Amino acid sequence: MSDTPHIPGAPRVTVRRAALALLLSCALLLTTGACGGASSPKAGKAVGAARATPAADVAAASPTSSAEKQKFAKTRFVANAGLAAGATYQWIIKPYKAGKFKKGAKGRKFALVKAALAGAFTYNRLKAAQKNAKGDPLLSKAVAPLSAGIASLKGMATKLRNGDASGTDISSFEKSITGIKSAGESAGAPVKDKVPSLSQLTSGAG
């Protein structure tokens, strides 16, 4: 007759095997510090190093040099100035020269609505370009003289929408765009026209 006790509802397991299994389980847990035992100094150092590594990687990946900051400022300047130039030419200067703003012209109302949006959009993008320029000493110096001209465009959207913009007003846009392009060129940040989509025009005009 076997001396193995029977556990109701479970397979027959010897006491010796059960005890051995329990000891092995606890030994395994002890190696990971899960049975209440303290982890070894080496293990503690390894964990500390592992935790410190990601933070170090993030710090190393963050752009901190002045050269990187200036490059980023120029990139943003070029993008904003390019959009302002594209919007001005496409929806203000071009239709004006084509006579689209004159009373009685076919499609005048729609042309004026788009011109008004372009006027507000251009002003906002030029203001953004001014802010970007401050991140680069040379570019900031080149853009500084344009402040008054850009500020004068603030209320132009209303005049364009009402059909009250004169040739002088249109020239103000043209001069501001020419000025911002020249400033960028002199500071090593050449600007190219980039016509925004109508959705960009609408969202960027506010």
Image: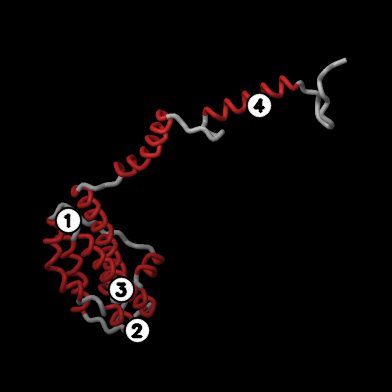
Q: Earlier in the sequence, mark 3 or mark 2?
A: 2
Residue 179: quadrant of the picture: bottom left
Judged from the image, the secondary structure of the residue bearing numbered disc 3 is helix
Q: Are marks 3 and 4 in contact (CB under 8 Å)?
A: no
Name which residue lies at 58% across and 25% down: 27
Q: Looking at numbered disc 4 in the image, what kind of residue is underneath it?
A: Leu
Q: Earlier in the sequence, mark 3 or mark 4?
A: 4
Q: Looking at numbered disc 2 in the image, what kind of residue is underneath it?
A: Gly
Would you name the residue on which mark 2 appears? 104
Q: Earlier in the sequence, mark 4 or mark 1?
A: 4
Q: Position of residue 134 (x, y in %)?
A: 18, 61
Would you name the residue on which mark 1 appears? 136
Q: CA distance from mark 2 to mark 1?
A: 48 Å
Would you name the residue on which mark 4 appears? 22
Q: Residues within 10 Å of mark 4 (few under 14, many from 20)?
A: few
Q: Looking at numbered disc 1 in the image, what kind of residue is underneath it?
A: Asp
